[in-house]
Amino acid sequence: MARGRAPDYDAQRTMIVQEAARLFARRGYPSTSMNEVAQACGMSKATLYHYYRDKYALLVSITDEHVSRLLAVVTEVFAVDQEPIGRMRELIRRFLQEYAGAQDAHRVLTEDVRFLEPADRERVLGKEREVVSAFAQTVAQVRPELGGAHLDKPLTMLLFGMMNWMFTWMRPGGGLDYADMAPVVADLFLGGLPAVATRETPGITV
């Protein structure tokens, strides 16, 4: 009879992915060994191999699972009937909420996707393209003339530039967190500097 999975198998697997993402984000995928991942997880390398066959399998899991969660957020937001501006604000809020708890995985997705083999890279990047397309579609709905001028995607990439690299300067325990920045990013993207509201001074409503 085949041996079944331990009751905590999924929890252990999640912990391994999180620890591997933390190491990859700080040391880089090429410079991190399975032995270091095992040590960070507090387990033997033999036990680690019970969950993942090699370091590459961890990279696939980190990148694919993270971008799949982002795509799921898009699906959930689009399932709610709302005006385009409201949808854009909700997309920004939900994405920054997701980034707040997945900074390491997001950094791995941003910096280490190039190490994926072609088929895996295309699958992951295909999901990324779906995410970008959903944002660009919303931009074009907010400002239809931008779509006609083929500016919907460039503007979407500028928005992701604001959101994706926030981890490089935002520090835990600082004066602002991801939840604080979500309305700021939305205000800035939708209305420019005059629209950015502070706690003391409201901006222009957009």
Image (tube, rainbow, N blue to C red):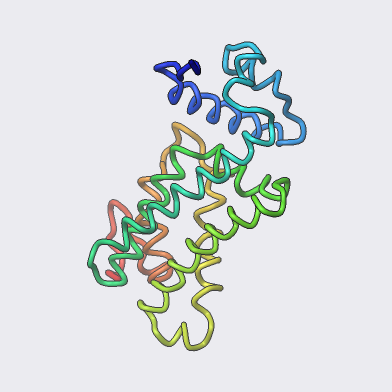
What's the residue at 41%, 41% (across, down)?
177
What's the residue at 44%, 37% (across, down)?
101
Query: Toward the viewer: 45 or 20?
Result: 45
Position above or below: 4 against 26:
above
Task: Report which quarter residue 188 is drawn in.
Answer: bottom left
Rendered-image quadrant of the C terminus: bottom left
Give x and y (percent) for residue 153.
53, 73
Give x and y (percent) for residue 93.
36, 53
What's the residue at 46%, 44% (across, down)?
99
Q: Residue furthest front?
A: 1
Position above or below: 56 against 165:
above
Is residue 109 visible in this depiction of the protein? Answer: yes
Give x and y (percent) for residue 105.
55, 39
Query: Toward the viewer: 44 or 77?
Result: 44
Give x and y (percent) for residue 191.
38, 71
Task: Report which quarter residue 76 is drawn in.
Answer: bottom left
Position above or below: 50 against 117:
above
Q: Residue furthest right?
A: 31
Total labels drawn:
0
Is 135 placed left or right of 124 in the picture?
left
Is 116 placed left or right of 124 in the picture?
right
Is residue 169 visible in this depiction of the protein? Answer: no
What's the residue at 25%, 71% (across, down)?
83
